[in-house]
Image (cartoon, coloured by chain):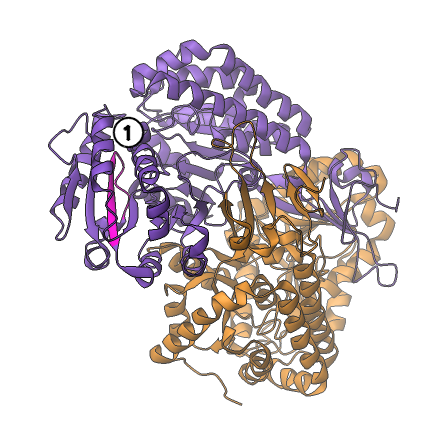
Chain colours: A purple, B orange
């Protein structure tokens, strides 16, 4: 097993050349074939579950139970993406037949989505399986027919190498690992790379986004960056189920030691909520835990210390000098202090720290929605009697989040057809896209139209006979019928 | 009628504030209402056809027949977009109901596309109706529910003001005109502007793209920039219909005095094609014509002069010192000279100038595809016996064009469900999107998911009862049925 280290310039050149050379074949391969390959990767991962989880545990310090479920999610994701590929709706196959009354100005035009070419994927540190080597970005890019060059995360190099071997055994040169910041920066501006996907910090993602958009030929850069995931609780919800909310909050913000992109970083509670004791006890009960990497633990400690120093912020739980293995920390402030305070109060603090913000009355609750930056999620805890204030609140949240969660918690992302995992800046660099769920495949395709093209030169999806059996829009109507069969 | 001139800072601020204030109402309005508003604009334009065409003719020097058909296309576009809105597929309504076996990890998730907010549209000079004030970008942004702030093109200020009044009469503060480069630059980085659409030069578009992506909160910038639109002709096609191809080429590259984004700028002919005389005579027959603006005429003359000076380029027709009213110019070179020559040989020359490139044999024809930059279109003229070479040629063109045209000409863009008007850089800044056709609306929306949300707080498109009658994917299956009705 080759542990990836800093990929050299000549190595990167070979890897990109090999990947680009496979693009036509992979892109032109039948969807059913790519679907089978994705399932093959999933089976190989499942077959080696115990050894992979053991390796991941050593490198990331995440608990085995979590890693087992993350691996199951990852292989489920690969299999789901193989269903998506075969379904074929992502192809957007559309056929406007020639208008017999005016075939010159209204010729036969047919379009279908085709793969972009080589995709550069950046693995994340906090999900060593689901957002890493064989994670969602890789699955959706390969599903679309794009070769993947994957920049490993240095937090789990051995696991990356092991999983990389398994993917490569199925996809060959259409998949490769690279390592090191220099290689990543060189790859993102390489002519052969046609898109990039990233999950990580706002600062790191922004630097790469700037490189991708600053190219002579800009490419799409799909970055999932920082997210504060605010939670808004009405007084009626506190009254009806305050303890349950306090417990759910602590469980959610401490999940995986707070190293989740969907971690609730702000909890808006009505002043006088009376949940201090329950939250503090819950946080104390979770106890200290080691973070993914020392670098991340240091970042968390620094940010936590800065938050603690902000005027109007008090410590409800944790918040001490524990650095490498932090205890869950809850800080408390007021809406006025949040509005007047420094930006860091409203930004993600990656790790087991969260801020309770106390508001006064419904108008302040609605105003709170206007104070938060773009997030992957926004959560509302409310009771049926809250309809009026909730309507105003949700109206304010629509422009601030990719997913609105009702009476639940944002951690936990269902992989399915409807999921949206993205959101307004800085939650993502491209608010119109998702990195989880069926639509993730759309990031790596573009439409290509054919005008008056003979059947033999059309892609199978666009021929008169619907040999793939996919849904197509023919002369404005969605159908699985052959052209001319209606 | 107010002729827009340089919009001042305070004016721009008022316009953007007013537009942003209308965003929730416009975005939340029923699709049927927006569809009716788009039709209303179309009717108002049609009612004033004669006066609008007369005004356009005075300002642009385009012939009345062309302007009449362009206005018809524009109103047809508005009406088509109103059909697209009502169809509702663009909403991408998707519902995953809760999994009764695991409602915690697999909750109810529903997503729908929502409008981005205020869109900044840059009008083009070469299509005073179809890509201007009430053009395709405006139609698709308003259709999506986004207010539009439109930067007028200074080539037709009076027409812009007149059409702007008509749109504003229907859309109120959700539509406004601005003017001047300074206002445009300020608007593209204004927090309230959530996306921008542009049609124009590569240099101008690139500068605005850099501003949009360089913002603290980057926004999508959909630019349609330069396109050379290569045409590839096989020897068999020359033999079968050489004269027809020569005539079609001249008609296409001189259409609207060459001021079309789909103008064929490169024509690849087999060496010894014998069409010199026919092409030269055709070009001479078209004669001189005034261009849209003196600035554009100067740009054309400068570029044409530079092309004429490239080693290995000879003049077949035109190419003289006629500046303000150029005659159609055809230059001829070889594939080797094209490959070795400066980039300008392979770039768009906006105006009635085109370059014939002579190739030697099928391998050179296939290699030619690799020499052209990203284009809106690529055209193939071939006969049935050419299948083998054409397959290789089209494979090479797939990554270089948004639309492949068969035995026809790229000028003329059918507005319909299947059209793709975009392409790899520099044809567009976002190869995954189109500025013409049904999918143009997708540029201005983003998905928003709702988790475990009560019916009353869901958008109509996501409620159990499919009150809009739109296609939705429910638990993986596309249907118009109510949830639970299956």
Expressed as whole percent of the image width and height from the top left, the position of residue A469 reads 77, 35
Task: Farthest residue to the front: give it.
Answer: A240
Residue A134 higher or lower than B205, as above or below = above
Q: Secondary structure at mark 1?
A: helix
Specify whether residue A354 is painted magenta: yes
Frontmost residue, A144 versus A419: A419
On the question of residue B120 being in view, the answer is no
Answer left or right for B90 relative to A403. right
Residue ID for mark 1? A257
| Chain designation of label 1 | A
Q: Which residues are magenta?
A: A347-358
Q: Is residue A94 above or below residue B297?
A: above
Q: Is residue B328 above or below residue B46?
A: above
Q: Could you classify mark 1 by the number of other residues whose Cα lies within 10 Å: few (under 14), some (14-19), or many (20 or more)?
A: many
Please state the total of marks drawn on the protein image.
1
Q: Quadrant of the N terminus of chain A?
A: top left
Please name whichever residue, A265 or A195, is drawn nearer the observer in this view of the structure: A265
Task: Judge left or right: residue A227 versus residue B367.
Answer: left
Q: Is residue B257 left or right of residue B158?
A: right
Q: Is residue B192 visible?
A: yes
Q: Quadrant of residue B145?
A: bottom right
Residue B402, how many percent across, how many down?
A: 63, 49
Whole-percent x and y of residue B131? 60, 69
Query: Residue B443: percent from the left, percent from the top?
Result: 55, 56
């Amino acid at each position: 097993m080759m542990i990836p280290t800093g990929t050299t310039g000549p190595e990167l050149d070979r890897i990109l050349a090999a990947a680009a050379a496979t693009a036509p074949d992979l892109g032109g391969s039948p969807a059913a074939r790519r679907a089978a390959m994705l399932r093959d990767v999933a089976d190989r991962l499942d077959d080696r579950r115990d050894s992979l989880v053991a390796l991941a545990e050593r490198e990331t310090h995440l608990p085995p139970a979590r890693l087992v479920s993350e691996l199951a999610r990852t292989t489920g994701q690969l299999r789901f993406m193989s269903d998506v590929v075969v379904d074929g709706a992502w192809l957007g196959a559309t056929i406007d037949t020639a208008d017999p009354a005016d075939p010159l100005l209204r010729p036969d035009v047919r379009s279908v989505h085709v793969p972009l070419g080589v995709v550069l994927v950046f693995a994340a540190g906090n999900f060593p399986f689901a957002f890493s080597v064989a994670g969602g970005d890789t699955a959706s890019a390969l599903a679309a027919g794009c070769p993947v060059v994957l920049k490993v995360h240095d937090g789990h190099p051995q696991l990356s190498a092991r999983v990389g071997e398994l993917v490569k055994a199925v996809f060959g040169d259409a998949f490769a690992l690279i390592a090191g910041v220099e290689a990543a920066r060189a790859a993102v501006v390489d002519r052969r790379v046609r898109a990039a996907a990233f999950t990580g910090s706002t600062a790191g993602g922004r630097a790469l986004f700037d490189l991708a958009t600053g190219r002579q030929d800009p490419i799409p850069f799909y970055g999932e960056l920082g997210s504060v995931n605010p939670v808004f609780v009405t007084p009626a919800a506190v009254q009806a189920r305050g303890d349950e909310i306090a417990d759910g909050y602590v469980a959610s913000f401490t999940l995986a030691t707070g190293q989740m992109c969907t971690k609730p970083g702000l909890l808006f509670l009505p002043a006088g909520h009376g949940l201090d004791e329950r939250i503090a006890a819950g946080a104390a009960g979770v106890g200290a835990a080691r973070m993914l990497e020392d670098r991340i633990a240091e970042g968390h400690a620094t940010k936590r210390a800065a938050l603690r120093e902000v005027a109007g912020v008090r410590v409800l739980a944790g918040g001490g000098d524990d650095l490498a293995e932090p205890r869950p920390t809850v800080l408390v402030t007021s809406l006025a202090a949040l509005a007047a305070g420094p930006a860091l109060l409203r930004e993600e603090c990656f790790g087991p720290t969260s801020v309770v913000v106390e508001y006064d009355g419904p108008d302040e609750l609605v105003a709170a929605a206007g104070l938060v930056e773009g997030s992957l999620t926004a959560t509302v805890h409310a009771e049926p009697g809250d309809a009026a204030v909730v309507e105003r609140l949700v109206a304010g949240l629509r422009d601030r989040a990719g997913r609105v969660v009702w009476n639940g918690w944002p951690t936990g992302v269902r992989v399915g057809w409807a999921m949206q995992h993205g959101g307004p800046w800085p939650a993502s660099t491209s608010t119109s896209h998702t990195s989880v769920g069926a639509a993730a495949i759309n990031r790596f395709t573009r439409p290509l139209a054919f005008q008056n093209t003979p059947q033999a030169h059309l892609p199978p999806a666009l021929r008169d006979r619907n040999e793939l059996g996919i849904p197509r829009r023919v002369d404005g109507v969605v159908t699985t019928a052959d052209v001319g069969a209606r």
